[in-house]
Amino acid sequence: MSKLLKFSICALSLLMAFGCEKQPKNDKEVKNYWPKAGITYEIFIQSFYDTNEDGIGDVNGVIEKLGHVQDLGANAIWFMPIMPSPSYHKYDVTDYKAIHPDYGTMEDFKKLIEEAHQRDIKVVIDMIINHTSDEHPWFLESKKGRDNPYRDYYVWAQADTIQEYLDKKVVTLDSDNIRQWHDPGFGKDYYYGFFTGDMPDLNFDNPKVREEIYDIGRFWLEEVGVDGFRLDAAKHIYPDDRAVDNHAFWNEFRAEMEKIKPDIYLVGEVYDMKEVVAPYLTGLPALFNFDFHYTLLDAFGMEDGMLLAKKQKEIIEFYEGITSDFIDATISSNHDQPRLLNELGKNPDKQKQAIAILMTMPGAPYLYYGEEIGMLGEKPDPNIREPFLWDEASKDIGRTSWMEPLNTTDKTVVPLSKQKDDVNSYYNHYKQVIKLRNTNPALAIGDLKLPSEAYPKPVMAYNRKTEAQDLMVFHNVGKKALEVDLPEAYSNVIYSLKGAKVSGDKVILPSFGSIVLEK
């Protein structure tokens, strides 16, 4: 044996001894389980990568960094709004068939789709159809008068008929707006805008509006070539007291889109409890599981491991009572919540375990850009959408500068370039657990079974199983080390975090340690 080889083996042994995570096996085929259980990476182009030195991220920047998405192991990209808009976030659209000029051209975007597809990466775009911008040509026409052809594209009412609602505060899980009826300055007629006056709601009782929306969908599927849509504010197409009409609309929308693309991917934002969410599944086969995010945080906060495992089992079974054709879009964070690391008290061990939990649970996980390098951010919203750090400031030619970051800076977050060379970095950890999922079918598409054994409160335990593979997963979400009995026949350790191990007939779980055992 050469001296160099002996040194390499010793170095590896030292890394393992001092807590480096055990690597997932490399001898299994890496599979793409999208959309049923694949991994989608959410990108805010504004903050991602700038190629024309205007301080704003652009489509060409995403093309340049597709290798990052591929190396991470993600199977698809969800783009936050890309259409022309007067706001930085672009959730108020002025033109549904164009790319915001700050981001590039439609030809740039078509090239992005082509390049992504060559890498086996799907492309999903944000579709904002609950409302438009108040600068959209439809609305500018609509407010000209009651006889205007576009008047009924929006919801209007005379002031004397809605007097009792004008100052009524309607608070929901996804909006704390203090009023929904807005005066365009005439003093007689008011229009409805659930979120803000800048975002007037479209009137989906008008067949012309519905056909406009279907035409927009057809454009992006046929002429541009996207793979699917993330449907913003899907619960609010009609008011809450017309939930049945909401469900019917999305069923109709799905049918129209499937005429163009039978395998279209539709994921909806319905921010509510499972009983409200589930009926949307027939029209929107994928729905974000916000309960996963909040229960994950609660599990850490209460040091109650089975809290999340039981909640996930409950949700899956509830959804199965509606339809077997659903995709559970699990999330650890997104553009509307504080950054995950902030939510976890800036504890790196918790963040690493959180993604290990996400990747070993059933569902189709979503990752928010920057989470893989430990980006920080708290409300208000712009501060959780800060520029990605690709390199040290002096070398980062593509870092965006459209805003001055308050949370993710060179002093608080290590840039990607440095994390790549650090085996213990967030980035390499994310790559490891994503690969673990993509090389073990039971973790991606296996059934979820909860154990009958009673474990200490901080222990999260569950079984993931397919016909060909049987895995047992343990996570200790508590601050103290624990040990549990080794389940019979589960002797093969395929992944360990924080030095979790098997010792005799026991599983040793350090604080925030995880282990995956194969039967």
Image (cartoon, rainbow, N blue to C red):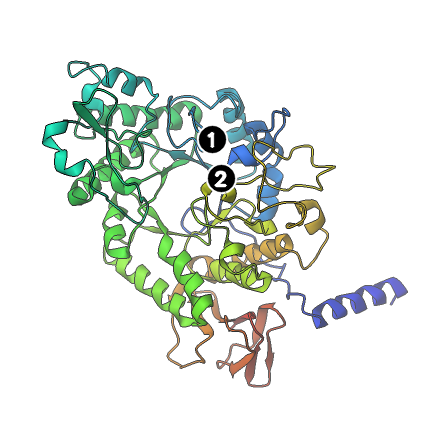
Q: Which mark is residue 382?
A: 2
Q: Residue furthest bottom?
A: 505
Q: On screen, 468 above or below 134?
A: below
- Say which amino acid is labelled 2: Pro
Q: Please indicate, yes or no, whether residue 312 appears anywhere in the rendered image.
A: yes
Q: On screen, 486 above or below 103?
A: below
Residue lying at 10% horizontally and 31% vertically, measured from the top left? 161
Quarter of the figure that contains the N terminus: bottom right
In the image, 90: left or right of 432? left
Name the one closer to the observer, 227 or 312.
312
Residue lying at 61% horizontally and 62% vertically, measured from the top left? 25
Q: Please indicate, yes or no, whether residue 466 appears anywhere in the rendered image.
A: no
User: Badge 2 local density, few (<14 within 10 Å), some, or many (20+)?
Assistant: some
Distance in Å between CA atoms under marks 1 and 2: 9 Å
Q: Secondary structure at mark 1?
A: loop
In the image, 441: left or right of 415? left
Q: Secondary structure at mark 2?
A: helix
User: Badge 1 local density, few (<14 within 10 Å), some, or many (20+)?
Assistant: few
In the image, 203: left or right of 5? left
Q: Residue 84 lies in what quarter of the image? A: top left
Q: On screen, 238 above or below 354?
A: above
Q: Position of residue 95 (x, y in %)?
A: 38, 21
Residue lying at 55% horizontally and 40% vertically, measured from the top left? 386
Q: Position of residue 34 (x, y in %)?
A: 45, 47
- Say which amino acid is labelled 1: Tyr
Q: Residue furthest left?
A: 161
- Which numbered disc flags the more N-terminal residue, 1 or 2? 1
Q: Are marks 1 and 2 in contact (CB under 8 Å)?
A: yes
Name the one closer to the observer, 62 or 477.
477
> Which residue matches tag 1?
88
Q: Position of residue 41 (x, y in %)?
A: 50, 44
